[in-house]
């Protein structure tokens, strides 16, 4: 038991403690609260860096706690976990910065930031979970901690949205619970990566295990917003921008996608699921969701709604990558987990900036905003280009690997899905860009709050710019080892060599 | 083992003494005295916990009188767990009451509380059926007194209903015991269990006993007395009632069920109990969803929770010992989690009502902005009640699910899942109210932070139980006659 | 060392300068920055001029491992691209003096430039695709710079076509890289691997039409005659001169030239090429705007190059010989077409230039494009030489006759300029920048052969007068027909972007269907609109023209006879 | 037909009567009395058991019955207090029949 073994717990605790302290703090202590938030975020990132070192040296820190006889709570930092934990810790920092700026002189901040940290804590738990039981625990905790954020505004719309959100996610949670419980009833406590046991189980009860697989995927699919279960995502748009950024880019949808990754790779094992023919349906659903989401996005006139539907479609890229049998597809899926996070967070930041600075919510109000808020608009452009999948922005890398993976898995038709969705992406992002940059300004801005400075206030602007440049860097230096791509390749290597 | 070393007698003597003393001494001394009493209780129960976990089941004969006339006390794993639970919860509630009742001048609370506590400990420790009866009756009186304590008409009516129901129940129980004695000529649990045979008398007796206990536990169709009583009483009282009092009769039920191996001989009856539990889950959840008063919501959720707990009976089957063990653990865990969570939730609800001054949900608007900590406490308790992870409630539900999988009784799975959705529905309904930002009514009263912290501690305990469930599970699995009777 | 740093700077310097020109400090001097931006590219090409050495720079960390290199063919492209961009920038400095939105223009200009230069030096498909897309989308900004309705319309169609192209390209790249067994992303490997791929035809289709959008092959050309006229003149110069060649370059570097013998694809390319060469001629003659005419002429010239590529599918082994010729032809066309576009802007300033010089300045590039002098003559000759060597029946003849189209287009162009000069509002005052740029480009275009033609055995025509006659007779006949048409005006014109008007109303983005731009294309939905008589030449003029056309026709016939005689020997 | 059975039957009869009254009546005092009736029936049965030992009475049972009676008395007392307070508060002798379910 060397000191690294306690790291996963520490990573979890940083934000848990932050949450508790913030809950205790009185409302007025803004400076202190911000310091605690940012401090915790930075500490977490440092810890993650230590974890990365550990994982690169092939030793996986692990914490165990026996909850019930034969049922352990496992926090384990393997390479896949680090992938997600790293993403969320980095984005947490910037989202916190952004949120501090966004919620300046607005009420209920101690509540907001408390649940915010809690939400991140549960995301950490999800990423570091070492078995399905632990995963389930934090998965549900995430649902609980995000609900207060969704209804934060407290008006009727957000309360309604919150209800919808709960109906979807809790039902999904129940389905997931059913799946997990039945899996445990069959095979006991199955740690991630212990695919031999699952293989044995599948040998014994093939159709039962298939049903369980479907249950698991369906339960996770609700948060991952795959087609029939995507309804909550656009509704949850009433939440404040940082929440949307966090929900859509990192926490919730990714939790679902990440869970599916875990189930496919570390519970059933990719070869097994392929042999059982479990992947092909996922591929089809994902493809449909990709097209459907883009198509719906095309019809939205509200910026955040459009972004939400684009998320619906983008997250399914990940599932698509997972469902493509072969290393390239896997890389594509995993790397998109990060890339989509970076790009989408950028886009939501920018949408938030427009709303905060000029009160712009609808797309047709964006005319000529490029002159007024150039930096925000540049960031937005970068994000949009990434979504369309133009190099050197990160989105292209994912798309490329997905396409290659599709060909590798002899599923050529997937390419046309990718192409079609890129077309749709272009169709719903390029006009926006044209409005931003080339259309003349129509009249005055809807609700101009900040008139003194050229762009949004720094606290809002900097995170957007940083994430934008990160998403460029992730694409531009994709082949360097510590880039998302490099890490995804590392994971895939270990996955397929097993 | 003599009286000084063993904590068992203290667990009975101190509360009784406390009851008498606090009745005699002047008002302003009662609280300090009781505080001292609380301390001793905690120490005693912890010591007992230590001893039992070290040396196994402890038998103690009051004043060395042996059964049948003497009062024989027995502390096995199950009893110990309940002792610990009741002293923790009761301490919390007592502290809360201490602060809360200082706010509104009422001093006669203490004697009743100590009586309650004494009877509870008596029930947990009783080794023969008649002591159980006495305990039940004392408990009833104390509880009814506490309910009537608020002395407005709602609580009075509730207390009368409660009293009648309880009396009926205990009479049935007494009759059953009498029949048992007639059949077997003994009252001690263990000797009854040894010489047990399924004659018609015994069957009638068991039926009577079960009926009476079910009525006192407020299992589904016989639950009508509970919501007004629990909802109408003062906050700490409601917490005590929901967390501990109903558990007493349930505890007795469980002991009979297992030690006399009823599950083995009347499987159909166990299914019936399961059905009743399911009914309680659905109906209680549904009614909770329809309530307009905060404490009524919580009270009805108690009804539903009792349903959960009584799902362990159909799962305690003779066929599958593994499943039965899981069901047993699950049921106990559920009971424990409910004790903490429900106490926490009632206290939090009481704080909220204290803030708004109105008992209805609609007036909770803006509460989560005004008292986030309190809402947080309420929420944590809610998490455990919903059976969402991480919480004792979840682990309990998990065990019950596993057990129903293993014993192939899939229908209980459906019930469990629907139930958790229902409970989520009614708890989040409350949340939605607290998050509403309607007209900014800043005429809130501010409760002292301490009572909020007490509520929070209980809720946190119910959450922590999710991580530490292994301890209670180990404690209740300590060897003893009870575990031997388990399938 | 120096080469690699130049390679790096070639695309990156423009980017940096673009960022700079965004800052208020440099706003005023953005134009100068644009001039500086091309210097590394130009130096790079000069250092490699005529030498066969290949210098490259490998960046394993970049994208998926980038390889930037410069080889002779690419070098030619790089050369004319940098030159053309340089002079166009110079021209633009003057052109934009009064423009308020000039800073935006310059930023986009530099971005487009970086894309255009970058794609020429990138040897791996990823960075190639990146630069290509970059150029395309930044170019959009140049097209719609004026922000007027027709510009927006053109821009929209440009964008739609471009995206369709991008997607076709991406498909081709996917399949191509897969064809190498998912191992390589180097264009060369892919080109060599494509023939083995079992998606061969799909890949070729995607490559052909995908890059065809840029190269303006029929059906994919719709945006071109719309975008080139509406863009600011310098922008249209680079669009039509340099960026249009990006498609050609892509074909050269990605098509399996020399690896695949496929008569089907050969005929496909050839037929599309000739369709472009002649069809564009016919449609272009019926245009009203000089720049539109030039755009169509670009299409027809690109057609010739497409034909050449097609021939390489029939005779793969000739590839090494043909490609340099093709590249040189591209160079010639780029410079000359650039000069012609610039002259459109100069046209309004004719008063400030000595008439003779001005006329020369107008006619020299036109004749050169027809192939009667300067680089054009050499280019045509060399191309024909090569095609002779291929021994594919009919090709050479058709190429020769394509001069007919070119002649007609050039005549139409000059005619329209004349018309503008005659009844146009008082001429704008002279601008030294624009004239400098124009003159410079003219000179470079004229001397292209001797400057850049190194490595090609260019024959001095003084020694072969008969050859020259062979070159001459077709244009003269063309001239005759043109004159005849002027005498008997065919009262018909075809709207710019011909076919596009038929299905344009479908190409609209969702929220662009708001009333402001709802029915903008309804003014000309008919493919052909018959117009009542305008600019009818006066009878007297017509008579003399009539006589002149006869003279020209006779002259042409004589020349033909002479040429036949030459053949018989 | 021995005494045991008679006692038992009588007890059961009393219990039945009491139960009926308990359910049938709404008047609180009547209910209370009915409850006492049940109690007495129970004690009667127990006493019946005590007779079994042919003359030798069973102390245990006597102890039980005594305790039971004490408990019953105190219960009655408590009930009476409550009923009285209820009467003072509402002036009614029965509960409002809107069962809280």
Image (cartoon, coloured by chain):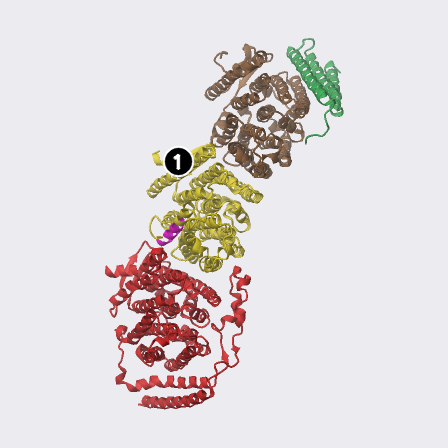
Q: Residue furthest top?
A: D55
> Quadrant of the rendered structure where residue D63 is?
top right
Q: Which SS does the magenta portion mostly show?
A: helix
Residue A472 colored in magenta in the image: yes
* Chain A, hue in figure: yellow
Identify the residue under disc 1.
Answer: A10
Chain drawn red in the picture: C
Q: Which residues are magenta?
A: A467-476
C11 lies left or right of A211? left
> Is A498 in front, or is C405?
C405
Say few, some or many: other residues with alpha carbon within 10 Å of mark 1 (under 14 / 14 to 19 / 20 or more).
Answer: some
> Quadrant of the rendered structure where residue D28 is?
top right
Q: Is residue C74 above or below residue B435?
A: below
Task: Residue B302 in the image: state x and y as whole percent.
Answer: 60, 30
Residue A108 colored in magenta in the image: no
* Chain D, hue in figure: green
User: Is residue A252 at least partly visible in the picture?
Assistant: no
Give the SS element for disc 1: helix
């Amino acid at each position: 038991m060397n000191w690294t073994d306690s790291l996963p717990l520490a990573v979890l605790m940083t934000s848990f403690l932050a949450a508790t302290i913030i809950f205790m703090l009185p409302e007025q202590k803004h400076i202190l609260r911000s310091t605690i938030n940012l401090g915790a975020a930075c500490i977490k990132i440092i810890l993650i860096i230590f974890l990365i070192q550990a994982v690169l040296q092939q030793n996986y820190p692990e914490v165990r706690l026996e909850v019930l006889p034969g049922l352990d709570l496992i926090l384990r930092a393997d390479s896949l976990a680090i992938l997600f934990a790293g993403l969320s810790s980095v984005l947490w920092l910037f989202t916190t910065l952004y949120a501090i700026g966004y919620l300046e002189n607005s009420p209920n901040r101690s509540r907001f930031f408390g649940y915010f940290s809690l939400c991140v804590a549960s995301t950490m738990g999800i990423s570091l979970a070492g078995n399905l039981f632990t995963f389930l625990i934090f998965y549900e905790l995430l649902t609980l901690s995000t609900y207060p954020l969704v209804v934060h505004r407290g008006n009727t719309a957000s309360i309604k949205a919150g209800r919808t959100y709960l109906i979807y996610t809790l039902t999904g949670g129940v389905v997931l619970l059913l799946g997990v419980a039945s899996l445990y009833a069959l095979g006991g406590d199955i740690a991630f990566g212990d695919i031999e046991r699952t293989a044995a189980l599948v040998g014994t009860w093939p159709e039962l295990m298939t049903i369980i697989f479907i249950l698991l995927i369906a339960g996770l699919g609700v948060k991952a917003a795959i087609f029939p279960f995507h309804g909550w995502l656009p509704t949850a748009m009433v939440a404040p921008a940082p929440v949307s950024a966090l929900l859509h880019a990192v926490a919730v949808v990714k939790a679902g996608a990440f869970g599916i990754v875990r189930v496919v790779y570390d519970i059933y094992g990719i070869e097994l699921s392929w042999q059982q023919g479990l992947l092909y349906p996922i591929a089809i659903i994902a493809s449909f969701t990709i097209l459907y989401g883009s198509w719906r996005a095309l019809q939205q006139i509200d910026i955040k709604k459009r972004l939400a539907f684009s998320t619906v479609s983008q997250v399914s890229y990940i599932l698509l990558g997972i469902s493509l049998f072969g290393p390239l597809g896997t890389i594509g899926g995993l790397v998109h987990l990060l890339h989509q996070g970076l790009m989408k967070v950028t886009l939501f930041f920018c949408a938030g900036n427009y709303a905060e600075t000029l009160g712009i919510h609808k797309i047709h109000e964006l005319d000529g905003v490029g002159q007024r808020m150039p930096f925000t608009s540049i960031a937005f452009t970068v994000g949009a280009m990434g979504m369309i999948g133009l190099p050197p922005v990160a989105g292209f890398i994912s798309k490329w690997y997905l396409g290659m993976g599709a060909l590798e898995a002899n599923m050529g038709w997937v390419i046309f899905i990718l192409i079609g969705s890129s077309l749709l992406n272009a169709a719903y992002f390029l006009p926006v860009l044209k409005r931003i940059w080339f259309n003349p300004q129509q009249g005055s801005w809807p609700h101009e709050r900040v008139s003194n400075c050229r762009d949004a206030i720094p606290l809002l602007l900097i995170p957007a710019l940083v994430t934008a440049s990160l998403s460029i860097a992730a694409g531009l230096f994709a082949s360097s080892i510590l880039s998302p791509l490099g890490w995804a390749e590392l994971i895939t290597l270990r996955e397929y060599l097993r | 083992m003599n009286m000084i070393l063993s904590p068992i007698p203290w667990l009975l003597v101190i509360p009784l003494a406390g009851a008498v003393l606090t009745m005699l001494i002047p008002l302003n001394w009662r609280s300090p005295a009781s505080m001292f009493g609380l301390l001793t209780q905690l120490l005693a129960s912890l010591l007992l916990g230590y001893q039992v976990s070290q040396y196994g089941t402890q038998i103690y004969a009051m004043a060395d009188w042996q059964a049948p006339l003497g009062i024989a006390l027995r502390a096995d794993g199950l009893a110990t767990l309940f002792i610990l639970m009741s002293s923790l919860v009761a301490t919390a509630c007592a502290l809360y009451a201490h602060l809360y009742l200082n706010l509104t001048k009422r001093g006669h609370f203490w004697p009743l509380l100590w009586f309650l506590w004494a009877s509870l400990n008596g029930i947990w420790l009783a080794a023969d059926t008649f002591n159980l009866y006495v305990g039940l009756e004392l408990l009833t009186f104390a509880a009814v007194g506490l309910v009537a304590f608020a002395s407005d008409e709602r609580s009075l009516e509730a207390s009368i209903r409660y009293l009648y129901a309880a009396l009926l129940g205990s009479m049935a129980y007494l009759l059953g015991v009498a029949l048992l004695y007639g059949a077997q000529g003994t009252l001690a649990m263990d000797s009854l269990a040894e010489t047990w045979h399924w004659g018609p008398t015994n069957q009638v007796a068991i039926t009577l006993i079960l009926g009476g206990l079910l009525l006192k536990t407020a299992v589904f169709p016989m639950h009508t007395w509970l919501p007004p009583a629990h909802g109408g009483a003062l906050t700490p009282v409601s917490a005590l009632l929901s967390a501990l009092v109903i558990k007493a009769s349930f505890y007795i039920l469980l002991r009979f069920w297992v030690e006399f191996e009823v599950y083995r001989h009347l499987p159909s009856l166990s299914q019936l109990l399961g059905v009743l539990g399911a009914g309680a889950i659905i109906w209680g959840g549904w009614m909770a969803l329809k309530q307009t008063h905060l404490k009524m919501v919580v009270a009805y959720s108690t009804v539903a929770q009792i349903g959960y707990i009584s799902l362990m009976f159909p799962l305690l089957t003779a066929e599958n010992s593994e499943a039965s063990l899981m069901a047993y653990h699950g049921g106990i865990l559920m009971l424990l989690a409910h004790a903490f969570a429900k106490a926490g939730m009632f206290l939090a609800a009481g704080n909220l009502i204290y803030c708004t001054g109105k008992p209805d949900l609609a007036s909770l608007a803006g509460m989560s902005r005004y008292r986030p900590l309190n809402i947080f406490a309420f929420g944590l308790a809610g998490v455990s009640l919903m059976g969402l992870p991480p919480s004792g409630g979840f682990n309990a539900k998990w065990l019950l699910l596993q057990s129903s999988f293993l014993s192939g009784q899939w229908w209980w799975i459906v019930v469990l899942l629907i139930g958790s959705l229902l409970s989520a529905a009614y708890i989040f309904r409350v949340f939605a109210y607290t998050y509403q930002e309607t007209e900014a009514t800043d005429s809130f009263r501010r409760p002292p932070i301490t009572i909020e912290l007490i509520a929070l501690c209980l809720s946190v305990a119910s959450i922590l139980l999710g991580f530490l469930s292994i301890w209670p599970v180990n404690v209740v699995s300590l060897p003893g006659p009870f575990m031997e009777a388990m399938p | 060392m120096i080469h690699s740093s130049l390679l790096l700077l070639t695309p990156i310097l423009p980017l940096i300068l673009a960022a700079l020109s965004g800052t208020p400090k440099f706003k005023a001097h953005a134009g100068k920055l644009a001039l500086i931006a091309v210097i590394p590219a130009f130096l790079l090409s000069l250092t490699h001029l005529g030498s066969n050495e290949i210098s490259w720079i490998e960046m394993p960390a970049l994208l998926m491992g980038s390889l930037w290199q410069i080889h002779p063919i690419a070098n030619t492209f790089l050369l004319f691209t940098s030159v053309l961009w340089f002079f166009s920038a110079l021209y633009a400095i003057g052109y934009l003096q009064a423009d308020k939105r000039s800073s935006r223009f310059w930023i986009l200009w530099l971005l487009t430039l970086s894309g255009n230069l970058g794609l020429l030096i990138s040897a791996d498909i990823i960075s190639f695709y990146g630069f290509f897309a970059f150029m395309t989308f930044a170019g959009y900004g140049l097209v719609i710079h004026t922000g007027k309705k027709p510009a927006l319309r053109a821009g929209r169609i440009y964008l739609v076509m471009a995206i369709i192209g991008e997607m076709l390209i991406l498909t081709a790249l996917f399949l191509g890289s897969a064809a190498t067994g998912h191992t390589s992303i180097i264009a060369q490997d892919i080109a060599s691997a494509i023939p083995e791929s079992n998606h061969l035809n799909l890949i070729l289709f995607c490559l052909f039409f995908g890059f065809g959008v840029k190269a303006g092959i029929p059906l994919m050309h719709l945006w071109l005659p719309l975008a080139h006229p509406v863009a600011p003149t310098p922008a249209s110069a680079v669009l039509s001169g340099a960026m249009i060649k990006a498609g050609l370059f892509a074909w050269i570097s990605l098509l399996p030239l020399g690896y695949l013998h496929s008569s089907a694809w050969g005929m496909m390319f050839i037929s599309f090429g000739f369709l472009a060469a002649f069809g564009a001629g016919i449609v272009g003659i019926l245009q009203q705007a000089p720049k539109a005419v030039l755009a169509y002429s670009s299409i027809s010239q690109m057609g010739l190059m497409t034909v050449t590529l097609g021939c390489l599918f029939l005779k793969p082994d000739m590839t090494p010989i043909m490609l340099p010729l093709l590249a040189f032809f591209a160079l010639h066309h780029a410079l000359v077409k650039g000069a012609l576009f610039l002259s459109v802007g100069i046209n309004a300033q004719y008063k400030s230039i000595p008439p003779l010089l001005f006329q020369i300045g107008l006619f020299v590039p036109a004749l050169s494009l027809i192939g009667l002098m300067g680089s054009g003559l050499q280019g045509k000759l060399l191309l024909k030489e090569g095609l002779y060597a291929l021994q594919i029946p009919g090709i050479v003849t058709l190429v020769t006759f394509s001069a007919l189209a070119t002649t007609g287009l050039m005549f139409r162009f000059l005619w329209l300029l004349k018309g503008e000069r005659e009844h146009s509002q008082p001429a704008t005052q002279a601008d030294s920048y624009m004239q400098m740029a124009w003159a410079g480009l003219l000179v470079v275009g004229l001397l292209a052969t001797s400057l850049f033609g190194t490595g090609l055995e260019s024959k001095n025509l003084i020694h072969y007068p008969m050859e020259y006659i062979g070159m001459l007779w077709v244009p003269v006949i063309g001239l005759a027909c043109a004159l005849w048409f002027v005498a008997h005006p065919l009262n018909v014109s075809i709207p710019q972007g011909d076919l596009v008007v038929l299905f344009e109303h479908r190409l609209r983005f969702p929220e662009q269907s708001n009333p402001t731009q709802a029915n903008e294309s309804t003014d000309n939905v008919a493919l052909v609109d018959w117009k009542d008589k305008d600019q009818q030449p006066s009878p007297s003029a017509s008579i003399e023209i009539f006589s002149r056309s006869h003279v020209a026709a006779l002259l042409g016939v004589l020349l033909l006879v002479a040429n036949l005689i030459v053949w018989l020997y | 037909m021995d005494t045991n059975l008679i006692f038992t039957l009588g007890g059961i009869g009393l219990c039945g009567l009491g139960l009926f009254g308990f359910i049938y009546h709404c008047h609180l005092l009547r209910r209370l009395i009915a409850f006492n009736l049940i109690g007495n029936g129970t004690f009667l049965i127990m006493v019946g058991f005590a007779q079994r030992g042919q003359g030798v009475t069973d102390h245990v049972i006597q102890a039980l019955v005594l305790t039971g009676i004490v408990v019953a008395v105190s219960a009655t007392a408590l009930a009476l207090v409550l009923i009285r307070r209820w009467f003072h508060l509402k002036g009614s002798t029965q509960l409002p029949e809107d069962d809280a379910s």
